[in-house]
Amino acid sequence: MGPPGIGKTQLALHAATDLQDEFEDGVCFVDLSPVRDPELVPAVIVQSLSLLSSGAPVVRSRLFDYLRDRQLLLLLDNFEQVMAAAGLVRDLLAVSPWLKVLVTSRVALRLRGESRFRVPPLPLPDLAHLPPPASLVQCPSIALFVERAAEVDPGFALTGANAAAVAALCCRLDGLPLAIELLAARCAMLSPQMLLERLSGRLLLHSDGLRAVPERQRTLSAALDWSYDLLEEREQALFRRLSVFSGGWTLEAAEVVASDSPSNAPGALSEDVLDLLAALVSHSLVQRQEAGGRPRFALLAVSREYAWAHLQASAEAAPTQQRHAEYCLALAESAEPHLTAADALPWLDCLEHEHDNQRAALSWLLGTCQAEPALRLAGALWRFWRKRGHASEGRQWLQAALDLADADGGSQATLVSAQARAKALLGAGGLARTLGAYGQAKALHEQSLALYRQLGDETALAYATYYLGADAYDLGDLPLARSLLQQSLVVFRQAADPRGAAAVLLALGELARDGGHLAEADASFVAVQQQREHREAYQVAWSQLNLGELARLAGRYERATAQLEESLALFRELDDFETVAMVLHRQGELAADQGDPARARACLEESLLLSRRWGFRTEEAVALRVLGLLALVQGCSGEAADLCQQSLALLQETGEQVSCAQALGALGWVRLAQGEYAEAAALFRESLAGLEKMGYRVGIPACLEGLARVHAAQGHPRKAGRGLAMAAALRQTMGVPLPPAWPFA
């Protein structure tokens, strides 16, 4: 069993060839593709056996008599259009104990004792980790493409230049053998890269290059026509409508999107979607999958292109796409309140499974100028985008929706509710902050705050104020950050919103830590930990991260290791890539404190990789800075200078002030090691001024110590002594000792 083009016939022929010595009377291949009348099947089998007979009753009798004593393998190919002849197969097996029947079909015969084998697509390569061409060509889908391409272009070979394009083509074709063969035949005219660039519905469905195959297999469209024509009218209607889904769907989604109000119109669907969907699965046109322990369904790429072409040619296209967008909006808004709750993980997973559908829905809403639902959908998804590493893409969707709302000289704006706009602005600011665009984040959050004030939505106003406090922190105004956070905390407590209050307590704890008030910070983090009746995975993970960092600063490395490891495990489970990158760089600093440069480098390089992949510019800069200092400790001052300069350049672009001041100090240590004392002193002073202005006291001792070393190198021992004494006193006051293996903390 299997969909069109999966290779059922070829697989059956190979199996029959391998087994022919096991059958005394050999193998008989019966091609049923030309037959549509089940009553003709006995005659076709008789003809394939080279038996002579006339008249239907005589044919059937002659067939039974012949097979009664034969040890034979009967291969019945393309049985799907003569399913009514399944009874003949049952009777043949009953009359001959030595007969074996191998059937290729897109539909099961449903006979007692039937063993079904669903032919899977060819294995595909991992596009993220492609091996060298010599190894890649061992992958069955790649091997088939290369073999067929070489038939039309004898000079074709898999090389470093075309391997990625060939792999991408095979993946786009879902490993479907016929699709791969047909497209590879186009290599007579086009390179794999050109094929990939031009791969569309028409090229995909109408590629024609295999002459030694039946007419119905010379194009994918012809192969699919064969299956489509076998469907009942209502099954065809459902098949068309299911093409609106991208990345698969659930049964519930199909029942909402593919149904319509009951009517007598041809192709109308109502409450019987389940039965019709089951029919499409049995015809191998729809693939049943598992996702999160629940059944999920999908169309192979070629089947979806075919069904989509039929949908677009019908009057059903716009209504189906509208229902699809409305379903996606309802799902996103149902998920939204759970994304900051204890049960966030299954909802995040659900949205991940539906992400391609949400993209399709946003494209439809924007393309049809539906600003209000586009803003609502993007506004409901922004936390999912942030937590699952899609911040850059989400920011683009939100901006597109906001632009649409402001289009046509403001005419669209009058059609958009203030609530939808305010939430979209809040989300756009949150994603801008994640991506290091702190100035833009502040401007967007201010607009959101103004709208929430007009609406009188106190809880939403508290969240907007909280995010503005975070923006103030990023931009180096720690007193303003504290004031805004305390304002939001009051509102959250008045509104009995424990989750909002916990988020603010965590932020206030970070401010206290940065200001050198470690006991106050510890109290804030512990207070969040103690709210057990309201605890959820994110709060626990963040609390452990912050408590681990406090323990590191205080020199309690064993405790810090345990807390950071627990935090990392939780954030990995939640697929919160941004915070995973943050925990990894903190673990890297901890390993450096403990004198373990190999572990430090491993953690920092993983953090850097994640940050670059998902666009977390601040985390990227922090990882670069600490890697630079690690290189400096290992005696590689040139590498250290390059890494620290990259870090500083990134932070100067983002405007993140605290990390920028730290990067200046790191570069100061590099220049000190290189003997460039004047520049080192200037960098330390600039860093020190920034840290003092922002109240980032925990970073000040390292700057004072660096400046003291410059004074010592320049022959000013008294200045050096005073600087070291000030640093030591400040460390003692804050309870932040100097790590013996890491002089930069």
Image (spheres, rainbow, N blue to C red):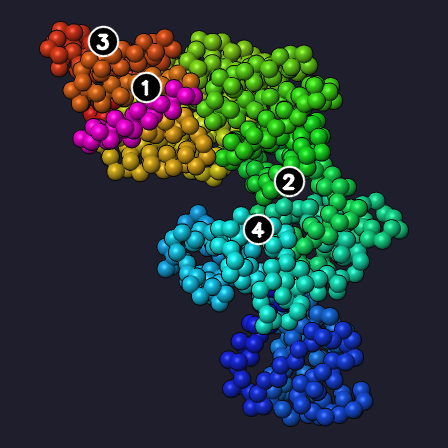
Amino acid under disc 3: Met
Camera sees residue 176: no
Amino acid under disc 4: Leu
Q: Quadrant of the C terminus?
A: top left
Q: Residue visible at 38% across and 30% down?
A: 620
Which residue lies under the disc numbered 1? 662
Judged left or right of residue 415, residue 644 is: left
Question: Magenta residues, as a range?
Answer: 626-654
- Give the crowd class for mark 1: few <14, some 14-19, many >=20 residues within 10 Å: many
In three-dimensional space, the C-alpha distance between marks 1 and 3, rounded to whole angstroms, equals 19 Å
Amino acid under disc 1: Gln
Q: How many marks?
A: 4
Looking at this view, is 488 or 28 the one in front? 28
| Residue most extreme to the front | 189
Of helix, strand and loop, which one carries label 4? loop
Which residue lies under the disc numbered 2? 360
Looking at this view, is 500 or 31 the one in front? 31
* Pair 3/2: label in front: 2
- Give the crowd class for mark 4: few <14, some 14-19, many >=20 residues within 10 Å: some
In three-dimensional space, the C-alpha distance between marks 1 and 4, rounded to whole angstroms, equals 49 Å
Label for residue 199?
A: 4
Q: Quadrant of the N terminus?
A: bottom right
Looking at this view, is 360 or 253 the one in front? 360
* Pair 1/3: label in front: 1
Which residue lies under the disc numbered 3? 726
Q: Quadrant of residue 443?
A: top right
In three-dimensional space, the C-alpha distance between marks 3 and 4, rounded to whole angstroms, equals 67 Å
